[in-house]
Image (tube, rainbow, N blue to C red):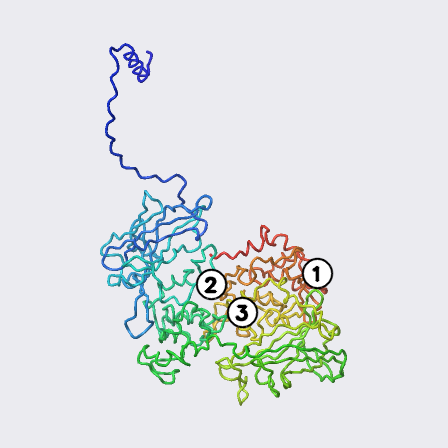
Amino acid sequence: MKKYNKTLLAATLIAALGVTGCGSDGSDGAPGAAGTDGVAGADGTSAGLTVTTVENAYDFNLQLDPKEIVVVGTETFNVKFTVTAKGTGGADVPYSGLDEVALYVTSQSANTTDTGAPMLWTNHALANDFGSSMYCSLTGTAKTWSGTEVDACTLVEDAANPGTYTGTWEHDGNAPVVLADGDANDLVRVMIRAYHVAMADGTDISDKVLSTPIDFIPATGEPAVSAKDAVSNAACIKCHSPMEGYADTDMRIANIGAHHNYQKVENCVACHNPAYAGGQDDPEKGFNANFNAMIHTIHAGHHIADSLTGDAKKEGWGEIGFPSELNECTVCHDNGTQWNDNVYAEACVSCHVNVDLETGDGHKGIVPSSDAACSGCHGAGSLSPVQAHNVGVRAMATDSIEIAVSSVSYTEDAVTVTIPAATGWDGTVTAEHDEVQDEIIVTFDVTVDGAPVADGFEFTKFTKYDEMKTGYVNADGTYYGSESVNLNGTVAAGGKLVVTQVANYDLDAKSIAITPRFSVCTDSKGMLIECLDASGEAQYDVGYVAITMAPTYWNLANADGSGATISRLSDPMRVTADEAKCNTCHTSLGIAKHYGNERFDQCVGCHNDTWGGSYHPQPEYKTDEVDADGAPIFKAIEGLNYNTRDIFAVAHRFHSGLWDDNRGFPAIHLDADMETQGYPAVATQCAACHKDGVNLFAADGGLTSGKRAIAVDGGATKFISPVAEACRTCHAHSDAAAMAHFESNGAIVDGAPSSTSNLPVESCATCHAEGKTYGIDKVHAGAAH
């Protein structure tokens, strides 16, 4: 049976009726009234405009709305936030599928007692005996890190608006992050940690995923500014490195080992507040966990090691060395003057651990009635923190002293001297003999406070180091030699010190470099002081500060010294490290080690590529063992030796922990797992010390500095390749396999040195130069995890 399309059939029938119908069409009627518009439907989410994974923690952006947060008073808890992440083309799109977070909520309120800081943090969950934070999950329950199941707020994603989440409390009572008796006019800080945020391959990203903390006033929902943030994240980053990828307005700290890094000072205080505080006499803690006191104790660790107890002793805080001067409060306190204005015992005794304010011991027998009484003596004047700690006056003595070379006279083979018999460091015995030696006369202009130094003055009683290292510089900028001209014993006359010395200098017609290793003793006020007391012992609390003096280059072929060649370290184009970056952490390079070297080209007098050997040839590691006094035992790393003192090798080795403990430097060391401990920055972040945008490799595959060989003996007769040695000075490249790799790529390595300094360029740059697949800019990019 044939089937017909019914719609088409109906249309044909209507058409037929129209043709055969009777009469004419009527007129059109007037238009009817317009109907009411229907309710618009909700827009659907376009396909592809949400994401469920991220490749970096910094691509995950959680935004809290203060007006949608209830955490104070009797109203029912509520929180609402949105999350975006990077979608196609780098656009920010909603992040969907978040299943668990933790809320950290703190309030800042005035201290109504006479003990402690003027303003105090209160962690809401801790105040409600619920731990340090509150979870939110899809089920309203969660498991803690220890596996205990706890009540949680219920997390719901808005189906109509993916990436928008609310949290509510579905259990008895109010949520534990609500402070019932809190003041809605106090500042509140909220931050959220997100869990199970994964990359496209399903692996959780390694960084903690933390929102930017927000400070606001609950009563109004308006932003607020904390009165307690005396230390900025930028201050910590100076030593601990920045996390990459975050905006300048959201700076985060890259390398803090505790709790696997909570990234910001604002996050740390969520737990480290008075609720966790404990005194120095608490044997279970051994330190005060309140943030202000704890941070002081940690950074003063090496200075107060013998006084540490409990956890502080167990965790090795006594081995933490502060790279700047401990009394320079503004190194960390860069955000206001609270550190000077707010005087209270808790902060003070965290550094002054030998002070007992209950008995007056260490405090001249004075027992203050309360913290309020402290300001009576320490609120202003010479006992205020800024003056008592001499903040900013460290170099007062050296700022007023200037030393400059005004002339050099040199005569080869000028004097015959008698050399007494002696035994050298290597055991070689020499007999008494006559020797023809050279004479050098150096005239130094010395001013104090801008005026010529007084006649009759000499430095002998005031110097820690008094050397002016004297060597020569060849045509390619390489420094040779390490003789010294010493100022001690020379009496000033006419504003000058004229030093005459005789030695085997062998400098005739050469370009010489006079580089200072010169520092003076100062008292606690930064003023010049004699180094030894009347009995010949070192003065109590004496400090050493460097005379800042640029090297002098003098061409002995010309009477006026003109035409001298400068060393590589005085040529900015050949120096890849950055003194300014070093000083962000050390404040002054002079503090870092010898109290006499403020510039790289001052260090060259000793730390150069032609004077081989090392005072620290055998690196050690910290074992898990302790001696009878409970001190850690360090053992040598068998089969690993170093015989260079070049500045780059020494700097790399010290900061990576390839050092020894025989001179009291345990601050940066290797642990039993051969991991570096104590270096505050990200170890692979070369830019922490090196200049931005500079290549470490030159076009020919060698180093940008032009260095092509390093001596490994005092006589400069045995040499090794510099690129391999640079790599070997970090612990990851120190084993036998690494040495074999270096040699297979053309390097001359320690243990098999060459007798010539004319070494071939290693082929390291073929794979590891900037821009290569395994370039140093990629493998040492320094991303924090």
What's under tag 1, amino acid-wise? Leu
Q: Name the residue: 64% across, 65% down.
A: 571
3D distance between C-alphas at marks 1 and 2: 40 Å
Q: Give the numbered dot on residue 635.
A: 3
Secondary structure state at the residue bearing disc 1: loop
Q: Secondary structure at mark 2?
A: helix
- Which residue is identified by label 2? 237
Locate residue 599: give its quadrant: bottom right
- Label for residue 1? none
In this picture, residue 366 sits left or right of residue 462: left
For image coordinates 53% across by 84% down, the residue present is: 529
Q: Residue at x 32, y 42 (%)?
A: 160
Marks 3 and 2: in contact by CB < 8 Å? no
Q: Nearer the viewer, mark 1 or mark 3?
A: 1
Q: Position of residue 324 (x, y in %)?
A: 49, 71
Is residue 659 left or right of 329 when viewed as pictured? right
Q: Amino acid at mark 2?
A: Ile
Residue 303 in the image, given as x and y percentages of width and height: 46, 75
The image shows residue 355 at horizontal and vertical percentages of: 39, 80
Instruction: Name the disc covering residue 759, or none.
Output: 1
Query: Which of the two discs, 2 and 3, sits closer to the camera?
Result: 2
Label 2, residues with CA under 10 Å away: few <14, some 14-19, many ≥20: many
Whole-Å distance between the Cαs marked 1 and 3? 35 Å
> Is the C-beta separation of discs 1 and 3 under 8 Å?
no
- In this rendering, the answer to whether 503 lies above or below 134 is below
Amino acid type of the residue tagged 3 in the rendering? Lys
